[in-house]
Amino acid sequence: MTDSTLSSIDPAAIERSREERIRIDASARGPLLHWLASALFWLLLGTTLALAASVKLHDPEFLANHAWLTFGRVRPAHLNTMAFGWASAGSVAVGLWIMARLCRAPLRHGWSLHVAAVLWNIGNAVGTWGILTGGSTSFEWLEYPGGTAPWLLAAFAVAMWQGVDMMRRRPPGHIYVSQWYLFAALFWFPLLYATAQVLLIWKPVAAPAQPPINWWFAHNVLGLWFTPVGLAAAYYLIPKVLGKPIHSYYLSIIGFWSLAFFYAWNGMHHLIGGPYPAWLISVSVAASVMMLVPVLTVAVNHHFTMIGNFRALRWSPTLRFVVFAAMSYTLVSVQGSLTAIRAVNRVTHFTHYTVAHAHLGMYAFVTMMLFGAIYYMMPRLLNREWPSAALIRVHFWSCAIGVLFYWGALSYGGIEQGLNLQKPDMPFLDIVARTLPYLRMRTWAGVLMSVGHLAFATSFLLMLFGKERSAITPTLFANPAPKPDPA
């Protein structure tokens, strides 16, 4: 909705819309802050585990005297606390808030989300403890012991019910694209997670079938859970901050349905060279390449929405994080399609390049998008302003530079590692030694990102417990004429 359109609307209608948003935010305040505070806790714990795991790669004696701090336990504990503790809890909070806003439906029975947050935290605590004490399942992205899943599924069932309830109560009429993504994600995640739990942990299938199921889940939890929430946030926040509509509703429909159709076939390219039918691998490779359709569609839609408004990046913290995340989504997706091609996969498989690619997706896209959404949500939930623009700058630049440094170092080092692995005359230990400089760069990049996380945690806690300060517009780096907040 543009400024000129808003000016033509009855002022009484604008006031009613504003009061409606205030009621919605008030209904969501307690439950969603509970989820966001929980997400922050797991972010900080996951960051600590990440640094420990990274240092161990180039200094194996670091914290080597305790079994529960060995690399084989710390690294999966880091992955799961970040994926389920931080990113999933943050996605639930962001997704439900956007859904409430777009459905124009206040949250009901907020106590149920408080209970769900407790269950979610118990599940993550039990799972993390299980990994650190030696109970890992050994399935990547599913290392939490089997007893963890009921806690997480029960908690997510409440979030899913809340989303369905809001969609049921929305006024009749147009459904915005963000609602498509969020509503689908609320069903995709429990389907993926429960199916993987049943087939791999509760009632394991035959061993040869387990790797395809593992990679089906590992790939699709990113593409059909985190990605829809991230794209929904981008489709909501970019027009909101700019005060203009998305470039093309029809492009957004193409992006949604092509993502839904092609992504479910992804994941098997991780098994190239394995003892699996050629058709299984080939279908996955083809689907990975076809993912260029939704990716480029989304990229074009976001770019044309931003045209003429890039100067807003100078004053909007939300837009900085969101645009960075959206660009990272395009980059990681194109990189993923290329990596699925056999000729490329032959070089990058089993190298640090894969680790770089995963962090470009889960951190540069998912985590940075969540940061941007939280910077927009919190002033509206609490009706107070962020305490320090300087802390937000430290957060953004530390994390942005850190993850790009991380991705660049491990991508280059991984390609070099892959090429060296194909040299029959090069001793394996020499190849390992050549990766050490890149692994040290990884640690320093992790330190830089950790600084950003501490800045974010400081801002969040000051915001949560600080003095009341009215928030009419979001925190600005520079203070241009404030834009209206369209319905």
Image (cartoon, rainbow, N blue to C red):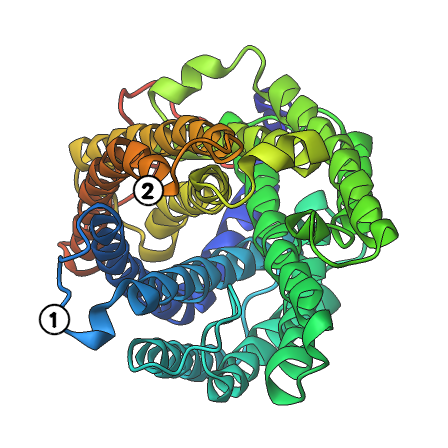
Please state which of residues 341 and 193 is positioned toward the viewer in this rendering. 341
What residue is drawn where x is 63% and y is 66%? 214
How many numbered marks have been drawn onto this rendered protein structure?
2
Give the mark toward the camera: 1 or 2: 2
Q: Which mark is residue 429?
A: 2
Q: Give the mark nearest the N terminus, 1 or 2.
A: 1
Secondary structure at badge 1 equals loop
What residue is drawn where x is 20% and y is 49%? 55
Instruction: Evaluate whether residue 9 shows in this view.
Output: no
Q: Where 306 sits versus 92, above or below?
A: above
Label 1 close to label 2 by CB (< 8 Å): no
Residue 407 picture location, percent across and down: 40, 32
CA neighbours of label 2 inside 10 A, class few (<14), some (14 to 19), many (20+): few
Is residue 335 found left or right of 415 in the rendered image?
A: right
Quadrant placement of the N terminus: top right
Q: Amino acid at mark 1?
A: Asn
Is residue 293 found left or right of 231 in the rendered image?
A: right
Residue on which disc 1 sits: 65
Please state which of residues 308 and 337 is positioned toward the viewer in this rendering. 337
Please state which of residues 222 and 442 is positioned toward the viewer in this rendering. 442
Image quarter of residue 359 = top left
Q: Which mark is residue 441?
A: none
Is residue 467 found left or right of 149 in the rendered image?
A: left
Image quarter of residue 320 = top left
Image quarter of residue 290 = top right
